[in-house]
Image (cartoon, grey):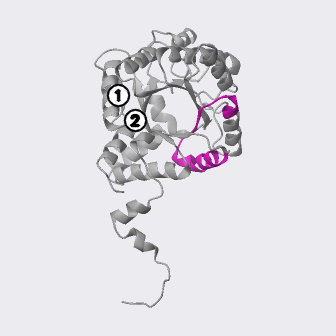
Amino acid sequence: MNSGNFPTTRMRRNRKNNAIRNLVQENIVTVHDLVYPVFVVEGNNRREEIKSLPNQYRVSIDKLLDIAHECIELGISGIALFPMIETVKNEASMLDSFNPDGLIPRAIKALKSNYPELLVFTDIALDGYTHDGHDGVSDNGDVLNDLTVDLLIKQAICHAHSGADFVCPSDMMDGRIVKIRKALDNSGFINVGIMAYSAKYASSLYGPFRDATGAMSKLGVQGKKTYQMNPANVEEALHEVALDINEGADIVMVKPGTLYLDVLYRVRTMFKKPTAIYHVSGEYAMLKFAAQSGIIDYNRAIIETMLSFKRAGANIIWTYSAIDIAKLLNHRYNL
């Protein structure tokens, strides 16, 4: 029925079919945005499901290479490595964090030998190696900043020697970026990048990750609140990011993702620096378990989540859904 000149603007004309919706779409998720976090264990032919992270596994290095091959085939840009250290953890075990024959250095070397084109990002933190799950040297629960930074420098150099493309300090110690950058440069690794976890919050959403790495059992009530950020704060995040950029970070990160889109938007708008978001384990698990219960369509929900990151300004998205997303995008899945 013709209603005359009302309304004068009809926004729905650009929504009437897939073809026009695709033409006017403002933000696009591509496989090149994605980095896939993977948990690595010692041994051979190991692929152990993580119950708190559906469809995610702890894998030995030989199985890691299978994952790397799939990432290459799908066009995923890189893999981020996290260790599951199964030996008894004590103060001496922190030496393993920079052991050139350790689990992560061997994993890096295997990846770069077989798939040199795949970017390798490595976690620079001590939580996988400490007896209490903290990210640094602990004195009765008080994490000692400067002693921790000294070990992080050694860990970063070790990973660079092994072939890492980016070292990624996730510890939230003060001053570690400038120290790591100087050490890398002085050791000849001027082309090894630093992706800094600059605005990492003391979130409730890390539980499945800590389950996967065995780093959650002894943290106590306070957890990591003395060094990770207060979820109530935004201006503090901008200060943290500014410090890391001035100290030499090539890429900055906001973590977690969906509950911190405002932080991501402000970081990208203010600094215009390559910015990553980490779609963390709890966020991933919630979508997976909701889908298993029939409450949501996982495919639609995960693409929508990725688009929210792109709208807010993310260049890079770390997500356990990377392979799922790549398969959807390669099949031209329509949201």
- Magenta region, mostly helix, strand or loop? helix
Q: Is residue 130 above or below residue 267?
A: above
**Along the line of sight, the residue nearer the viewer: 311 or 174:** 311
Return the mark for residue 191.
none
**Along the line of sight, the residue nearer the viewer: 100 or 17:** 17
Q: Is residue 249 magenta?
A: yes
252 to the left or right of 28:
right
Q: Position of residue 216 (x, y in %)?
A: 51, 27
The image quarter containing residue 185 is: top right
Crowding near pointer 1: few (<14 within 10 Å), some, many (20+)? many
Circle 1 residue: 68
Q: Which marked residue is nearer to the observer: mark 1 or mark 2?
A: 1
The image quarter containing residue 169 is: top right
Secondary structure under the numbered disc 1 in the rendered image: helix
Q: What range of the chain is rendered magenta?
A: 244-270
Q: Is residue 220 magenta?
A: no
Task: Count the labels in the image.
Answer: 2
Circle 2 residue: 52
Q: What amino acid type should be assigned to the residue bearing mark 1?
A: Ala
Q: Position of residue 188 (x, y in %)?
A: 58, 14
